[in-house]
Amino acid sequence: MKSVITHGSYKTSYFYIKIYTKKDIQTWLKEDGNIAYWIHEIIHYLQDLVLPYNINQILYKAIGFEEVISFINKEGYLKLDFNDNWSQQYNDLKALSVKTFGSLNQNEISGARDFLEYIAYKIECKLSPNCDEVSQCRYELVDLFFKDRGFPSTSDAIKICVAEFCLYNDKPLDTLYRLFNDKNLLILINKNEYQEVYKYLMSYPVVAFDCENLKTEDIAVIRREKLIKKLKCQYNGYDAIVKWIIRATSFIMNNYSGKFLFSDIYNMDTTNSKIELKKIIEKIGIPLVLNSQNQCISVGFDEKEEKQFINFYIMRKFMSFVSHKSSCCPICDLCSTNTIKKYLKCKIKKGIIIGEENCYYNRFLNNYGICNLKYNII
């Protein structure tokens, strides 16, 4: 998920932000790291901790990693271009959230990502000093939908609130259609009654795959508890990560339960919005921030925690690696910046990645007892 103005990106479900600068990342944070200049990525980062839809994606990726490790332990090797039950489940979940907006004459496929981008973009434009207007479907999906349905003058505040509510459901785009069949809600939208829309949606029933008749705060609690249960038995040696997720989500639940956080941030004045976001970041930190050369730093964590977050980053690279065909070590770019450049020569040789004993990747594999992992490139 790339920002419009800050030249950065956030990788959903893995809690790291990448800033496209060659500056030393610690220097960048001190000199240019004003929250207004990377607000887009920060919003995406918080979405992963707040919104049930995002929390569910983290859960599915944890299941995916579990499936890969299970296959390795059973078969004794790993076929690259890996495709097992987890990926089909994850794809099905995405497919259920995606439809084509034919009536809007858009060629792009629209889905949950568009809601996430819309919220981040609108907040970024309000809080950042140099935000330019863009005409890209993912940033204007909700605007287009409201206009198509006969509500071209609805305030951004209401549209953000509606988009945020949709992401409390497992099928956000279907939820948007459902909402526009509710005559009572449409009356409130037509009157531009933001507070009334907010209250109405806060008590509106959420639709989820595994539970019924829940309100927004109920589904948030259920998704959080399900994720924590999975993480506790899933990630060997990642106790600091699990503790951080528990601490961060507990802070969110204790302070923002029964609220639409992103709608509230948007509706504050600019100064208070920045103060609120700064308070959250100071409390929960940011696991990893990387520059364009993959130099990384943790914000608000000690050395042990930072090492675990690096491993979590490697897990993401590993999962991307196993789903494609490649002969290169998946984290050469990380090693070249943060360790010794000779690791750049790590290649798959006779089905095994050859690298230094203490390189990041070998340490990651060793953590799961698969340091002599053999690959079968199909």
Image (cartoon, rainbow, N blue to C red):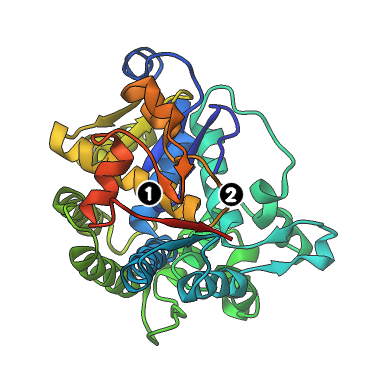
Query: What residue do we see at 37% from left, 14% from top?
Result: 24
Q: Is residue 64 above or below residue 280?
A: below
| Name of the residue lying farthest toward the front | 350
Q: Is residue 188 left or right of residue 137?
A: left
Judging depth in this view, the residue of 312 and 165 nearest the camera is 312
Q: Is residue 362 visible?
A: yes
Q: In this view, does 300 lie above or below 350?
A: above
Q: Can residue 34 be seen in this view?
A: no
Q: In this view, does 309 lie to the left or right of 105?
A: left
Q: In this view, does 195 lie to the left or right of 92?
A: left
**Can you say which quadrant of the picture contains the C terminus?**
bottom right
Kindly identify the amino acid type of the residue bearing the numbered disc 2. Answer: Tyr
| Residue 230 point in image, percent of width and height | 25, 69
Judging depth in this view, the residue of 265 and 23 nearest the camera is 23
Within 10 Å of disc 1 (Cα), the crowding (few <14, some 14-19, many 20+) is some
Camera-side mark, 1 or 2:
1
| Name of the residue lying farthest toward the bottom | 212
Q: How many labels does the image show?
A: 2
Determine which residue is flagged by label 1: 14
The label shown at residue 118 is 2
Badge 2 element: helix
- Cα separation, mark 1 vs mark 2, equals 20 Å
Kindly identify the amino acid type of the residue bearing the numbered disc 1. Answer: Tyr
Badge 1 element: loop
| Residue 256 point in image, percent of width and height | 28, 56
| Residue 317 point in image, percent of width and height | 43, 46
| Residue 232 point in image, percent of width and height | 18, 64
Tell me which numbered mark, 1 or 2, is placed earlier along the sequence. 1
